[in-house]
Image (cartoon, rainbow, N blue to C red):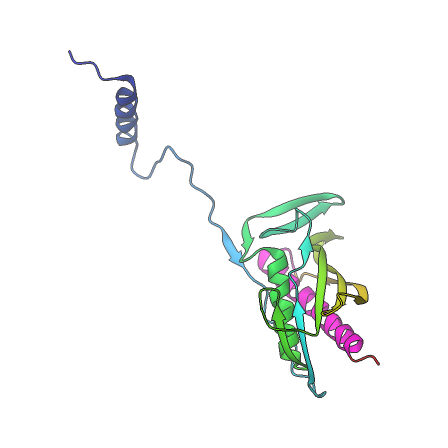
């Protein structure tokens, strides 16, 4: 009788076990399907004010470890963070917020150009920020979304801080479904962008 070496014997037994499983069964657990979400388009329309011959650079916001990723976060209780199961943002949250803000500035139209931090274009000012909150939380049984940025407007040539501000938006979800919560993230981002754009333009054109 020929004896198989132990590694080959183990492999042969594994193949026999798999072959004997009923159809549709597997030794390996199936992963839960992941749904990818992104923010809705900004609702801003073109401003009636004249376009300023200025270029703004929007840096990707910095963020703590919890927010620096693609997870949709929820705080079921103060100080506790969890992620929605089977759901992710299509990009990490800071990049998602950066792209949303750039698109909102461009739709507003009061600046000649708006670029991101990978562009080699010369800019007049830089918008740097820290993403302090981008999560949902429970408010008396109804989810609400909190989005918060700590913003600094920098002179591009001197890197001097021209102005700084905290901007926060809190928006209630229509119901507890994941789709409604994602829509609330979009409305919160919209409110954040509107306030940020008006503040930035006011600071850039100050005498």
User: Predominant secondary structure in magenta?
Assistant: helix
Query: In the image, which residues are magenta?
Result: 175-204
Measured from the top left, where is residue 87 in percent x and y?
54, 52
Kindly identify the residue that appears in the image at 64 percent across and 45 percent down. 82
Asked if residue 33 shows in the view, the reply is yes
Measured from the top left, where is residue 107 in percent x and y?
63, 78
Q: Is residue 22 magenta?
A: no
How many numbered callouts?
Answer: 0
Most extreme residue toward the left is 1
Residue 61: which quarter of the image? bottom right
Most extreme residue toward the front is 158
Position of residue 188 in the picture relative to residue 35 (left or right): right
Image vertical order of residue 111 relative to residue 156, above or below = below
Position of residue 116 in the picture relative to residue 34 (left or right): right
Measured from the top left, where is residue 43 in percent x and y?
64, 75
Kindly identify the residue that appears in the image at 64 percent across and 50 percent down. 73
From the image, which quarter does the N terminus lie in?
A: top left
Depth order, front residue of 33/196: 196
Position of residue 198 in the picture relative to residue 10 (left or right): right
Image vertical order of residue 189 relative to residue 75, above or below = below
Depth order, front residue of 128/167: 128
Position of residue 204 in the picture relative to residue 20 (left or right): right
Measured from the top left, where is residue 79 in percent x and y?
75, 43
From the image, which quarter does the C terminus lie in?
A: bottom right
Most extreme residue toward the top is 1
Most extreme residue toward the right is 207
Image vertical order of residue 103 relative to residue 19, above or below = below
Residue 31: which quarter of the image? top left
């Amino acid at each position: 009788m020929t004896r198989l070496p132990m590694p080959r014997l183990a492999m042969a037994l594994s193949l026999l076990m798999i072959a004997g499983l009923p159809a549709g069964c597997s030794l390996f657990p199936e992963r839960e399907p992941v749904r990818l979400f992104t923010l809705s388009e900004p609702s801003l329309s073109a401003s009636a004010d004249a376009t300023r011959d200025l270029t703004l650079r929007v840096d990707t916001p910095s963020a703590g470890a919890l927010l620096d990723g693609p997870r949709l976060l929820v705080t079921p209780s103060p100080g506790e963070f969890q992620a929605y199961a089977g759901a992710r943002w299509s990009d990490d949250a800071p990049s998602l917020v950066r792209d949303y803000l750039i698109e909102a500035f461009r739709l507003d139209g009061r600046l000649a150009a708006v670029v991101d931090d990978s562009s080699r274009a010369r800019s007049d000012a830089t918008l740097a920020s820290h993403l302090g909150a981008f999560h949902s939380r429970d408010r008396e049984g109804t989810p609400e979304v909190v989005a918060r940025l700590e913003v600094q407007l920098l002179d591009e040539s001197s890197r001097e801080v021209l102005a700084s501000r905290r901007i926060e938006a809190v928006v209630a979800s229509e119901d507890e479904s994941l789709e409604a919560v994602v829509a609330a993230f979009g409305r919160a981002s919209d409110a954040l962008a509107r306030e940020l754009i008006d503040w930035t333009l006011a600071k850039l054109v100050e005498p």
